[in-house]
Amino acid sequence: DMQYVLDRARVVGSEQQFLVGVRVLSGAIKANQAGGAYALLAERLIDAVLRAVERELARAHGKVPGGGAAVIAMGKLGGREMTAASDLDLIVIYDFDDTALHSAGSRPLAPTQYYARLTQRLISALTAATAEGTLYEVDMRLRPSGQQGPLATQLKTFIDYQKSAAWTWEHMALTRARVIAGPPQLRASVEAAVRAALVLPRERTKIAADVRDMRERIFKEKGTDDIWELKQVRGGLVDVEFIAQYLQLVHAAAHPEVLDQNTLEAYRKLRDAGLLAQDHAEVLIPATRLLHDLTQILRLCLEGGFDPATAPSGLKELLAQAGDAASFAQLEARLKEAQGRVSELFRLLIV
């Protein structure tokens, strides 16, 4: 029964999210381990819900010959950097036999209609409120063609779009793409398509100009001088992610080994390949870890922004502990210095 599946998913999801949070707050796991735990939970839930939705759709409309759908995790889920408050950035890719005109049920659907309906039901199954609460918010804006495009994309259309029509920011987002659900053969095909798009030769100066322009647009709309706005402040999460994504895009054609969905791992691979100077890595890796660790604590403990003037002393102590600082004052000094140095490297490296 689909309602039972939805309720059980929410029970499992809320229980496990709570346990991850308790382990972070109690010190049983470090904040930097939480991102992978939250992501693993989301992956398992998405896979289980997708299978249930596929069963329901097949009962009503049969199956599309040779058909299947794969889910690509993007953003924080793709990078295994989720927090307690993260939504899901997803793309759905489908494929089917070229000869298939419709599904093989008593109420047949054309393949494009079939997979559009599958995607709509998957989103609803993940987002709808039931008696057991809610599960996740889902963001599909990273799909090919953006908000105006179809919710699900056929594999060959996805390949053509990434090769000839995708913008720089879409390829940057693709550096975090990770296939997390779907039949094995289709998953392998989608993974190959993502990798092929990322290792295309690129003109460095054009990519750098696009990245700088995009960063300025974001800062103009959302920028801040508050060092505790960890994402949008200069030298914050947006900057460390953009630097890693830019360096991967401009070097992946010659050095595909630098590709990794996780920002920290990408920096380590870039350093090990000799494409990121050791002294730069010694700034970017600790700064990225610090920003992620502090973000985990804040998302776990607060719904709104963080104001040190009114924050409880216990929260400040927890933040200092997560940042390996002897005191909250020392943590603020470290954070401000790290953001300043990341901001400098953004200007130095993205050229």
Image (spheres, rainbow, N blue to C red):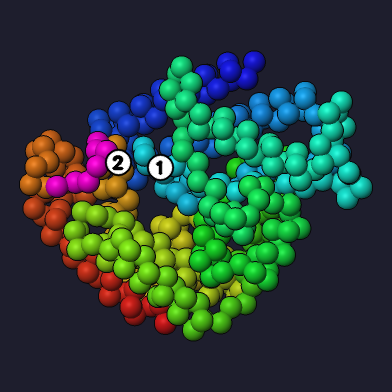
In this orientation, does residue 259 appear?
no
Q: Quadrant of the N terminus?
A: top right
Mark 2 Cα-neighbour bin, 10 Å: few <14, some 14–19, many ≥20? some
Numbered circles on residues, count: 2
Q: Is residue 263 left or right of residue 64?
A: left
Name the one closer to the observer, 186 or 258: 186
* Residue shown at 51% from the left, 81% from the top: 206
Where is residue 193, by image quadrant?
bottom right
Judging by the rendered image, the residue that carries numbered circle 2 is 299
260 w.r.t. 51: above or below: below
* Residue shown at 73% from the left, 54% from the top: 155
258 w.r.t. 185: above or below: below
Label 1: state its secondary structure: loop
Tell me, yes or no, whether the two marked residues, 1 and 2, touch with CB atoms within 8 Å.
yes
Q: Residue 76, how many percent across, how many down? A: 45, 49
Say whether residue 304 is magenta: yes
Q: Quadrant of the C terminus?
A: bottom left
Amino acid type at mark 2 = Arg
Name the one closer to the observer, 60 or 52: 60
Residue range (magenta)? 301-307
Q: Main secondary structure of the magenta part?
A: loop
- The earlier-in-sequence mark between 1 and 2 is 1
Judging by the rendered image, the residue that carries numbered circle 1 is 86
Q: Is residue 215 left or right of residue 112?
A: left
